[in-house]
Image (spheres, rainbow, N blue to C red):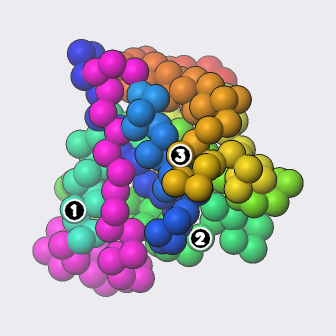
Amino acid sequence: MTTARILAISGSLRAASHNTALLRAAQTLAPAGVTVDIYDGLGEIPPYHQDLDTPVLRPPVVQDLRDRITAADGLLIATPEYNYSIPGVLKNALDWASTDWTRTEGVPLLRKPVAIAGAGPSQFGSVRAQLALRQVFLCTDSDLVVKPEVIVFRSHERFDASGQLVDETTRDLLQDLLGALLAKAEAPAEARALMATAT
């Protein structure tokens, strides 16, 4: 493909979030022809409600998220770690994007190329959150990038005071992650499905 659109979602609502800063770094590190759009509506998404999860009743902000995921060539998620897992707001958004009860729309996350990264202040970064997030994407049958793993531990040491990612190792890993995501996005859907069944 000549251009690729990556939708990036941070699992943190904090203004000074290192995970959101990680996505801003991804915007600058993206290869030529690749746009990384950061989604900023996570905090507006209401709690998942199956009775409202239809094309007619679904809240507009939820439908917008589903439409953006569907239109994107790939999804990049940066997650912090809360209580050894992913933030509730992130899981809630993914729940809204993982259904098609009427069997008329398609599931936005189904076979969608997805890459995961995450930052945290501890020695473990977001390793347990990323593991939990991988389980979610296993359920949705998304086309998950397995390597490289971008686990930004002691994240306060990787960013400067203005929120710029200054750690070169992390920048290299993030760039490689984008490359791996792009490779999946550029592969035809049929080929990606075959690769998934072969692994």
Q: Which residue does the numbered mark 1 point to in the structure image?
A: 64
Query: Picture coordinates of residue 37 (x, y %)?
Result: 31, 45
Residue density around tag 2, few if under 14, some if 14–19, many if 20 or more, within 10 Å: some
Label 1 – label 3 distance at C-alpha: 29 Å
Give me the residue at 52% from left, 65% from top: 16
Q: Secondary structure at mark 1?
A: helix
Of 89 and 199, nearer the camera is 89
Query: Picture coordinates of residue 72 (x, y %)?
Result: 29, 40
Give the residue type at disc 2: Pro
Q: Quadrant of the C terminus?
A: top right
Q: Using residue 176 as the reference point, say whether residue 41 is left or right of it.
A: left
- Farthest right residue in view: 123
Give me the residue at 61% from left, 49% from top: 160
User: Bounds of the magenta span?
Assistant: 31-60
Q: Which residue does the numbered mark 3 point to in the structure image?
A: 164
Question: Where, by quadrant of the figure, is residue 120 drawn?
Answer: bottom right
Of 5 and 71, nearer the camera is 5
Residue density around tag 3, few if under 14, some if 14–19, many if 20 or more, within 10 Å: some
Residue density around tag 1, few if under 14, some if 14–19, many if 20 or more, within 10 Å: few
Q: Is residue 36 magenta?
A: yes
Q: Is residue 49 magenta?
A: yes
- Farthest left residue in view: 56
Give me the residue at 22% from left, 77% from top: 59
Residue 38, can we see it? yes
| Label annotation for residue 170 | none
Of 47 and 169, nearer the camera is 169
Q: Secondary structure at mark 3?
A: loop
Q: Using residue 88 as the reference point, say whether residue 187 is left or right of it.
A: left
Dot placed on the residue nearer the N-terminal end, 2 or 1: 1
Q: Quadrant of the N terminus?
A: top left
Q: Secondary structure at mark 2?
A: loop
Dot placed on the residue nearer the N-terminal end, 1 or 3: 1
